[in-house]
Amino acid sequence: MRCVEDLARELVDELDARLGAEDDALVARFPGERPGRQPVHTVYVPADRYDADLTRSWGEQARHAMADHALVLRECLDETAPELLPLVVDKLEREPIEDLRIDFEDGYGVRPDEVEDADVARAAAAVATAETDGTRPASYGIRFKSFERPTRRRGVATYVGFVDHLLDAGASLEGFVVTLPKVTSVAQVEAMTTVCDRVEAARALPSGTLRFEIQIETPQSILGPDGAAPVARMVHAAPGRVVGLHYGTYDYSAFCGIAAPYQSLDHPVADHAKAVLQAAAAGTGVRLSDGSTNILPVGDAEQVRRGWALHLRLVRRSLERGFYQGWDLHPAQLPTRYAATYAFYREGFADAADRLRRYHARSEGGVLDEPATARALADFIVRGLECGALHEDDAAQASGMSAAQLTDLARPARA
């Protein structure tokens, strides 16, 4: 018996030596979920339309849309309206925009250098003003032109210039993240890392201050010439700097040859691309965002009804598929963004909390949950708390766990 015990110890020592480097690499590459709140959306605004009052203005416009078409919205929400509408109004008054991108790319277009340079300086100053006023969103940044040859010079100039003007205006880089669009190769991600390194050095910023998201809107990112998925390498090409993968609905669909009337974030080509993104990002701490719909809830009552009904359906669909963030392009999309998000968490809360309570207490129920499912149940409740759909007291009472315990279970760091 002693011989067998010695053999086991020897084997463990041998395997520790053999697999130690792989263990370390696994922790480095797949550290688990990033701490902190993930925004439920990203608002994209053309740079020439951005000013320091934008957050307040969008909240006001969203509330006006709700008031102007109150019956339409109630009909779209059906029996959940009385419960959800007060929460949505409160959100629009407190924090109408969770994440903002000032767009110097497709939403802005191609303009003379002196015009874009002026808009860069003006937008950075406006961000600094909004920060002073307390109206700057918790997460913000810009989208600049891509690193493809025709737009590379302009994209770099806008990025470097914006950071420079932002710092000169005394603004904080807390919550600052930028979007690198139309990425077609791992080399472009590596190039963005070089740009970040140089800007940090020039402005004496701590290494790793500047972070970016990769916008996936070309099939080359999903399927390379060798049959591999380049996006999986992109995620790991800039450790600590790549914080998100955003799906670009219309560019990706167009590149795949989808006719304009059928380009949508629920098209099969979109589902395929996003499934690849999901697998590539799993366990890395890199967050996912779905794209946008360009069918806006504006116009007469019937047009608003169609826009809101579509947006409600698409937001719910994304949430059910594990994409907890998406793009909004118009103030009138904010009511349905928050209504759909709140409904998702509130409808699933009771079951999730009951299953989690039984799991935590080791009591039997109708479902035998695995540890991984328990983490998913806890993450569901934590996300509901973070976005304002749920309240801590209700969560603690129903699940038997405090918010801190839920967070520890939902997002453990890989050891």
Image (cartoon, grey):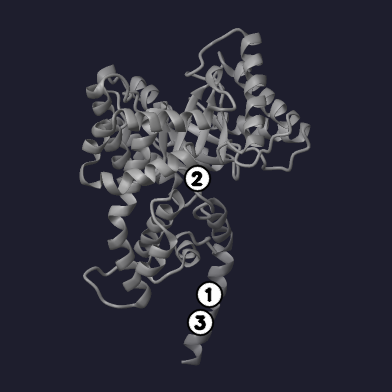
Measured in 3D between alpha carbons, the distance from the residue under mark 1 to the one under mark 3, in whole angstroms, is: 9 Å
Above or below, comparing residue 185 to residue 119 in the picture: below
Asked if residue 143 lies left or right of residue 334, the reply is right
> Could you tell me if residue 74 is visible in this image?
yes
Which of the 4 quarters of the picture holds residue 159?
Answer: top right
**Which residue has dot 2 on it?**
286
Residue type pointed to by label 1: Val
Residue type pointed to by label 3: Leu
Judge the density around disc 1: few (<14), some (14-19), many (≥20) Cα neighbours within 10 Å. few
Furthest toward the front, the residue is 67
Measured in 3D between alpha carbons, the distance from the residue under mark 2 to the one under mark 1, in whole angstroms, is: 33 Å
The image position of residue 346, as x and y in percent, is 32, 53
The one nearer the camera, 270 or 408, is: 408
Residue type pointed to by label 2: Val
**Which residue has dot 3 on it?**
7
Give the number of the disc on residue 12: 1
Callouts 1 and 3 close, C-beta under 8 Å: no
